[in-house]
Amino acid sequence: MGTGALVRVGTGALARPSRAKSGSCLRSRQCWIRQSLPCAALMTLTSMIASMMALTNATAETRPHYGGTLRVMMQSAPNVLDLPANATPADYRDTARTLSLIGDTLVKLDAQGRPQPALAMAWQSDPSARHWQLTLRRGVKFHDGSSASPAAIAQFLGALHPGWNVRASTDSVSIDSETPMPSLLAELALPRNLVLKHNGNENSNRFPIGTGPFLVAEWQPGKRLKLAANEESWAGRPFVDAIEIEFGKSLRDQAIALELDKTDLIETAPQAANGSPRHGTPTSSSLPVELLALVFSANSKAQDPRLREALALAIERKPIQSVLLKGAGEPAAGILPNWMTGYSAVFSAQANPQRARTLLAGSRQLALNLSYDPRDPQAQLIAERIALNAREVGITVQVSLSGTEDIRLVRAVLPSPDPATALVEAARQLGLPQPGFPATRGSSLDDLYQAERSLLAGYAVIPLFHLPVASAGSARVRGWEPDRLGEWSGAGLSPADLWLADSRPYDSRPYDSRPNDARPEAGSR
């Protein structure tokens, strides 16, 4: 264990049959057979036994079974296991995926934005959406053995959201607010609302304690995290015994490690998911869940809205998508992708150089400085192509990481399938004013459209592309794929639900084919 190795699960794994004992029994039966049966019958029976053993091994290879360590690689190198305030999309995604293995939210959302049970099994609100009551699962425990009681969860939510009035009752928590909260369930499903405690240390070895399928067994900040299966998980014990995550691995290093069978799950570029995957390797690309956009700084020299609109009209998105993004993603002129709203075509992403030149006629031309995130491997090439498009209509754009920043090429996470929640989160990341919703926030498609259009007015932000995220697994990974949102917490799609083909096939624990929500509570197996 490393310097941060602090928690281990008990030895509660159910016993697996001894292979030596099984072999001894088989030899005894073979001696009896030789003494009791004629040669022809012996040959027939031996053939039948061999066929049955082959069938057993084949079944064990394809049937879910327990055991093994899942090896994972990630780009980020966090020094603390917590969601950073201003994380890059890669850092946000990696941390959210990791924490979702350790903790649970009260509810989850599927790709259609429909709430699904998690720690909360049922919920209701009054017509004004100011008062909510959530009924919690009984008997759920944190990894340290303490109860995830309504009182504990109410204390957690109250500290995280001071503007809420959170109270606990016998089997539920109630949340009250002075303003309507029609999107409360979507808010509760965000990764920042994972119910997590911490071990109390204030140094880098501080780690989260949750109710999820895995608990922290070893933590080396910035380098490595080992998670052990939570034997008392309310959703059922994970199939794998442990998960080992290596941090700080570039996409290239991850791809090489997967090719050499040195890892099992990696992140990959979305365009790689569109190609031909390695034989036996599950590769999956999500719906577009990131936004690539240009954002003008508050003190930008481009204060004239006509200049900003001209830049938006100058950008040839299709060639950038085809060549630099290798076909991944969708050209965008709106903040939210079409799969969320269905109206993205209203915001035209078509270039119009002639219109751009008309807007610039007679205006004073200033040189603008365009910066980008140097950690983004595609950002510089995309920024340089945007600068070339700008110069073609008469706008001088210099791509540089030094000097005063006028425009910045950024990525923003769209962390929720609920469009109103995604719009609020995107505005926060882009530094835009919070969208103005009516009292019934996001209650209609027209409300959502008007809120998004108000954020785009004045061209303080120029959306460019909506991008997916992609993952790939080794040939020994079975029963897993990321959900359509690119998360690792979807029902039946979490690493807690996968198994490994080379794990020990002889396991006395019966496979429970029922969905997690239908399995018995922890302790009743």
Image (spheres, rainbow, N blue to C red):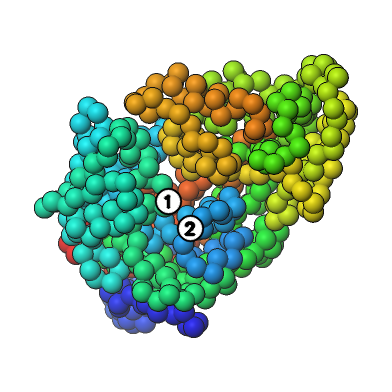
Residue drawn at x 85%, y 27% is 364
Left or right? Give the position of 196 relative to 269.
left
Percent position (x, y) of residue 153? 25, 56
Left or right? Give the position of 520 relative to 93.
left
**Callout 1: 10 Å neighbours few (<14), some, many (20+)?**
many
**Callout 2: 10 Å neighbours few (<14), some, many (20+)?**
some
> Can residue 212 be seen in this snapshot?
no
Left or right? Give the position of 367 relative to 474.
right
The relative height of residue 269 versus residue 48 in the rendered view (above or below) is above
Which quarter of the figure has residue 443? top left
> Can residue 234 be seen in this snapshot?
yes
Percent position (x, y) of residue 311? 76, 29
The amino acid marked with disc number 2 is Leu
The relative height of residue 88 versus residue 200 in the rendered view (above or below) is above
1 and 2 marks in contact (CB < 8 Å)? yes
Disc 1, SS: helix
Find disc 2 in the rendering and name its residue.
83
Residue drawn at x 79%, y 43% is 369
Q: Nearer the viewer, residue 224 or 29?
A: 224
Residue 191 marker: 1
Disc 2, SS: loop
The amino acid marked with disc number 1 is Pro
Residue drawn at x 57%, y 42% is 431
Percent position (x, y) of residue 264? 55, 61
Give the distance between the C-alpha atoms of the residues marked 1 and 2, in whole angstroms: 8 Å
Q: Quadrant of the C terminus?
A: bottom left
Q: Nearer the viewer, residue 96 or 151?
A: 151
Percent position (x, y) of residue 440? 34, 26
Which quarter of the figure has residue 30? bottom left
Residue drawn at x 79%, y 54% is 402
